Amino acid sequence: MTIANASRAVSDAARLDAALTRARARTLALNTDLTGAQLLGPRLAIVNPPLWEVGHVGWFQARWCLRHRGDAALAPSLLANADALYDSSAVPHDTRWDLPLPPLDDTLRYLARVREAVAEKLAREATPELVYFAELAAAHEEMHCEAFTYTRQTLGYAEPAIDAEREEAVHGGALPGDVEIAGGELMLGATRDGRFVFDNEKWAHAVEVDAFSMARGAVTNEQFAAFVADGGYTRRELWCEAGWAWRTASGAVHPVYWQQQDGAWFERRYDRMETVAPHRPVMHVSWYEAQAYCRWAKRRLPSEAEWEYAAAVDRAGGKRAYPWGSAAPDATHANFFGVCGRSADVGAFARGESAFGCRQMMGNVWEWTESTFVPYPGFVHDPYRDYSVPWFGTHKVLRGGSFASPARLLRNTWRNFYTPDRYDVFAGFRTCRAD
């Protein structure tokens, strides 16, 4: 190994050990206060039992960082029967409540053993393969931390202490109006610059984007309340066939956590009711609800190519890593994990605007796009095949991140994906003019 390669290995090991440590601290902060029945929660299709999910993040890190041997059999596990308990590709979702899961204390001891073993391996041999899998494990755990956060919302648990300690949500008011974007050729997707990206972002390829007009900010609670007041949930003509079937089956007449009292809207936030803030983005709405709103407002959702164009392209036609440029995200750019602990007004974070003047295209709330989640041309899955492959064709693409997303994962090419009926995630949307 050359001196340069040895130095790079030491740097990678230190960086990834810090990333894994941060992710684990957040996992613990989000779960160690849960007791008794909270550790399993009700059997729902949209969440995992917290006790299972905690074990799963430890299993995943061990699976790829300690046990992976290419095409050979896996190395032995640090926990007997771990594969039968925590392998999400093999353990059906509905059975996870019925498994003989270890108690929380034993599960945390398993996570600690895995974490120690990975740290020792990184210090000993930060090979390119191990660096990749450590990046994957850190990203995987951080994404589960966001899932832990919205699970607490779904189940009505207390606000996470790590969020409650943050400063009050940033105020910034409304942000009306559109920006005009001339369009042109876009290299959609990630470039081969050595940065860790997921397989579904690979690789950048040319697409043509026609001229379009996009809202400067996400749709606000105030705007969505006008749709509700105008009978938006009861007007069949506003809904696609699948959306109307979902609305009818769910009985939805407003966003899932909203309640109206004496003419005013309130929403459940974790285990408390709060007044709906007019200028914050509407959140916890499904793709079907976003579509219905667009039809009512005579607007449309952007395609993911339009979204990436508006977020990433600069005035000279180049492409940025972030809406504001190349500088790594900080608390003045965007509302990611560790900034507010909740959504902020759509007019906040002016320093994070894209070159075209769209604000908060990163952080605050995930944004639904019109696009179905499909592979890019020439797609080849990464070693963790089930990250993307099973979901192509059935999920819709979301972009941008939320207040619970980690800054280290934010980038203009990151593709999130959920089925169009999901309302539990921290998702909203922005619109384009329908020509």
Image (cartoon, helix red, strand yellow):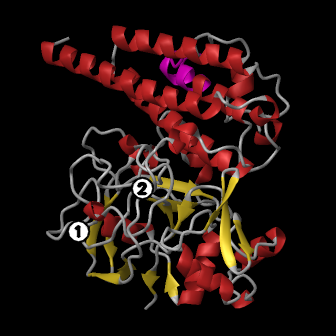
Give SS at disc 2.
Answer: loop
Q: Amino acid at mark 2?
A: Gly
Residue at the image position 80 percent from the left and 29 percent from the top: 36
Locate the N terminus and report the quarter of the image it occupies.
top left
Q: Is residue 30 above or below residue 289?
A: above
Q: Quadrant of residue 186?
A: bottom left
The mark closer to the camera, 2 or 1, is 2
Locate the C terminus and report the quarter of the image it occupies.
bottom left
- Report the disc number at residue 363: 2
Q: Say which residue label 1 marks.
A: 355
Q: Nearer the viewer, residue 88 or 238?
A: 238
Residue at the image position 33 percent from the left and 18 percent from the top: 127
Residue at the image position 32 percent from the left and 73 percent from the top: 208
Q: Nearer the viewer, residue 224 or 385?
A: 224
Residue 423 spot, x, y in % from top left: 66, 61
Question: Is tag 2's residue or tag 1's residue first in the polypeptide sequence?
Answer: 1
